[in-house]
Structure formats: C-alpha cells, structure tokens
C-alpha cells in the first residue's frame, strides 16, 4: 500500500513506521505524500484508537530529503510552486492535530527539522537515550519556524529555551528535554530505542471527545471522536 511507510496493527493500536532507513527516514516527496494521505484518512479509521509513530533503523527522521526534492522540482516551477510544496509539508502537522486519535512519537536517534516537527506535533513523545533533536532549518539559511515548530516548541518548553533552539539549531537530547519540560507529559524517557510495550496500549481504551481533545494548531477542537464511539 505504501512505499515509504510500514503499518502494523495490534488490535486498536496502530504502529506507523517511517521506512526509509538508508536515508535516515528523511522526508522525500513520496513519504510526504503518503503521510499526508494517512493522516487525512485517520479520522475515518474506526479501528485505530492510538497511533504510535517511529522510525526504522537508527533514526526517527532526519528531516527533509533535500536531494530528493531537488531532483523532483515542483510542477510549474518558480516561487508559487515552491510555496505549494511548502504548504503540502506543513499540512502534515495540521492533519496530525485534527485527528481524534492520540498520536505518540517514539523517538530514537536523529529527529531533525521536519522530523523534529513531527515529534512536536504528537500528543506524547517517548524518547530513547539516543534521541537528538534540533530545528535544523536555520543551519541551512532558512527560518527556524517551519512546519509548525515555532508554534509547538514554545508551548512545550517555554519561550526562552525555544528561542535558543530556534536561533542556534543546537541539538537537545532526551535528558535535557525531560529536564526542560514543564511536566512529564512532554517527554517520557525510555532506555535505548523505544520499543513495543504496555504503555501505548493503555491509551487505546479511550478516544478524544469534544470536551477532552487537545486543540489543533488552528485553535479548533476535534469532536469527531465523540461521534464515532
């Protein structure tokens, strides 16, 4: 069904694996398109109550695959086409936030740029000791505000730490992330690479309702779960 994603189901728990290990699971156009399709269809997936997102191999996601995108220029070319491509990537986090199911990011190894954004957009992040995350955009001469990072990061770690990470592109590891967070709801630290265990399954007995769901990046609440019980 997918070229760059692997889907495994255990009852109502769905494991989404970013499956380009040779490229550190970097976001190429195919993966962006497939993630967009998956998250677009997720609200209508009546079998999935919890989604766990992880990376194959030794990384969670190294961010945008610049070589792949350069070799496949956007249709039409020019600035408008580039903006359309950026919009397509940025919509991933909006679709994640609009889904009624809780999304857990199991992070190990590098989570850079767009990979960092995917982790931040999840409801819960479980980080292994090998996890290293950064807003890599600024190191490429871009802003550090791409793909919703500037929205989610200050709300999770506060304005000062967020400014440091956004302006420098410095890495933050799991230990510092856990210390920095205002509560353990941001990072739960696992030893080594996060693997299957009982904790994600404990979330599968409930779904978000209109009164209990988190706000999306657009400020609206998801009420789909209440209508699909």
Image (tube, rainbow, N blue to C red):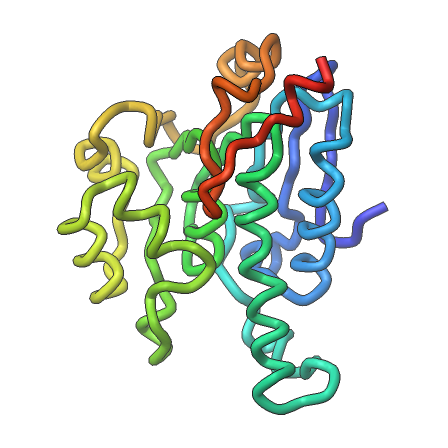
Determine whether 26 is above or below 177 in the image: below
Determine whether 40 is above or below 209 in the image: below
The residue located at (60%, 45%) in the rendering is 95
Q: Position of residue 115 (x, y in %)?
A: 48, 53
Determine whether 8 is above or below 197 in the image: below
The residue located at (54%, 59%) in the rendering is 90
Q: Position of residue 75 (x, y in %)?
A: 74, 82
Q: Residue furthest left?
A: 160
Between residues 75 and 180, which one lies in front from this camera angle? 75
Q: Position of residue 211 (x, y in %)?
A: 49, 18
Q: Quadrant of residue 54?
A: top right
Between residues 5 and 79, which one lies in front from this camera angle? 79
Quarter occupied by the C terminus: top right
| Drawn side of residue 194 relative to residue 16, left or right | left
Q: Position of residue 13 (x, y in %)?
A: 66, 20
The residue located at (41%, 43%) in the rendering is 120
The residue located at (57%, 87%) in the rendering is 79
Between residues 73 and 193, which one lies in front from this camera angle? 73
Q: Residue furthest right?
A: 1
Q: Residue furthest bottom?
A: 78
| Drawn side of residue 106 relative to residue 150, left or right | right
| Drawn side of residue 182 relative to residue 187, left or right | left
The number of numbered discs placed on residues in the rendered structure image is: 0
Quarter occupied by the N terminus: top right
Determine whether 60 is above or below 79 in the image: above
């Amino acid at each position: 069904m997918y070229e760059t994603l692997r889907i495994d189901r255990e009852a109502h728990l769905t494991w989404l694996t970013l499956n380009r290990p040779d490229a550190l699971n970097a976001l190429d156009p195919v993966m962006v398109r497939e993630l967009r399709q998956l998250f677009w269809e997720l609200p209508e997936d009546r079998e999935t109550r919890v989604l766990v997102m992880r990376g194959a191999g030794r990384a969670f996601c190294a961010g945008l695959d610049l070589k792949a995108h350069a070799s496949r220029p956007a249709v039409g070319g020019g600035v408008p086409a580039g903006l359309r491509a950026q919009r397509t990537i940025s919509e991933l986090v909006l679709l994640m936030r609009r889904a009624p199911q809780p999304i857990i990011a199991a992070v190990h190894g590098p989570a850079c740029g767009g990979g960092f954004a995917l982790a931040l957009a999840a409801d819960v992040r479980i980080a292994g000791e090998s996890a290293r995350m950064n807003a890599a955009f600024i190191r490429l001469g871009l802003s550090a505000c791409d793909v919703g990072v500037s929205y989610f990061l200050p709300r999770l770690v506060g304005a000062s730490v967020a400014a440091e990470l956004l302006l420098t592109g410095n890495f933050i590891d799991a230990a510092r992330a856990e210390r920095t967070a205002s509560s353990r709801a941001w990072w739960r630290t696992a030893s080594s690479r996060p693997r299957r265990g009982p904790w994600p399954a404990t979330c599968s007995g409930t779904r978000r309702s209109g009164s209990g769901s988190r706000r999306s990046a657009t400020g609206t609440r998801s009420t789909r779960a209440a209508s699909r019980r």
